[in-house]
Image (cartoon, helix red, strand yellow):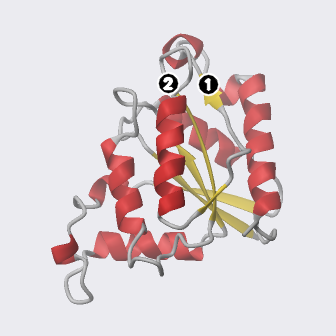
Amino acid sequence: MTDILVLVGSLRAGSTNKQIAETAAQNAPEGVSLTVFGDIAQLPFYNEDIDTEDTVPQSVVDFRAAIGSADALLVVTPEHNGTIPAVLKNAIDWASRPYGASQLVGTPVAVIGSAFGQFGGVWAQDEARKALGIAGATVLDDIKLAIPGSVVRFADVHPKDDAEVVGQLDEVVAGLVSAIGAPQAA
């Protein structure tokens, strides 16, 4: 079984990006499990003073363990004011530690998402890729999906009922699965 952990950069209950993540999970091919991690809101703001062996919060321990047990990550994010949502950046900060030896090091990661604007949140996706790469993840720059106009496109249609989106998500997951265990360029 291939395990992919999905991080959603939106906290809103009716989030289109959460719906996209759930659609990807529901349509996972046989032998692949996508688990949407639902608790990044429980991570405190990153503070090195509490990131010690004796004081690291349990929510962080659980988050890091989830990353460590996954074969890959799929990040699904909206765009907040032209950049990465704060809750997602905070999660990446926690995941990036301990420096040089975090659970992210070498983990294949794809970043996708949707936003209201005409470009589908590409700025946020690029910022997330940048932060994840600096944190040591193996960012798959060739796997991209930016769905523009989310408020209009999904006003009356759930992403799971949009055949084009389902097909695109299938391609994203297939690309991510094929990158697992593949040799990476030095």
- Compared with residue 153, is residue 99 higher up or lower down, i.e. above or below? below
Relative horizontal placement of residue 146, taking residue 49 as reference (left or right): right
Q: Is residue 171 visible?
A: yes
Query: In terms of image quadrants, where is residue 144?
Result: top right
Q: Nearer the viewer, residue 32 or 94?
A: 94
Q: Identify the residue shown where x is 76% and y is 67%.
A: 184
Q: Position of residue 132 (x, y in %)?
A: 50, 57
Residue situated furthest front in the rendering = 186
Identify which amino acid the numbered label 1 is placed on.
Ile
Q: Position of residue 49 (x, y in %)?
A: 16, 76
- Compared with residue 160, is residue 135 higher up or lower down, i.e. above or below? below
Q: Which mark is residue 115?
A: 2
Q: Secondary structure at mark 2?
A: loop
Question: Where does label 1 land, which residue?
Answer: 147
Q: Position of residue 182 (x, y in %)?
A: 81, 68
Residue situated furthest left in the rendering = 49
Q: Position of residue 64 (x, y in %)?
A: 44, 73
Q: Nearer the viewer, residue 157 or 20?
A: 20
Identify which amino acid the numbered label 2 is placed on.
Ala
Q: Identify the residue shown where x is 31% and y is 52%.
A: 41
Asked whether the residues under the numbered discs 1 and 2 touch, taking CB atoms below 8 Å apart as contact, a structural biologist would say yes
Q: Identify the residue shown where x is 83% and y is 58%.
A: 30
- Compared with residue 118, is residue 73 higher up or lower down, i.e. above or below? below
Q: Residues within 10 Å of mark 2 (few under 14, many from 20)?
A: many
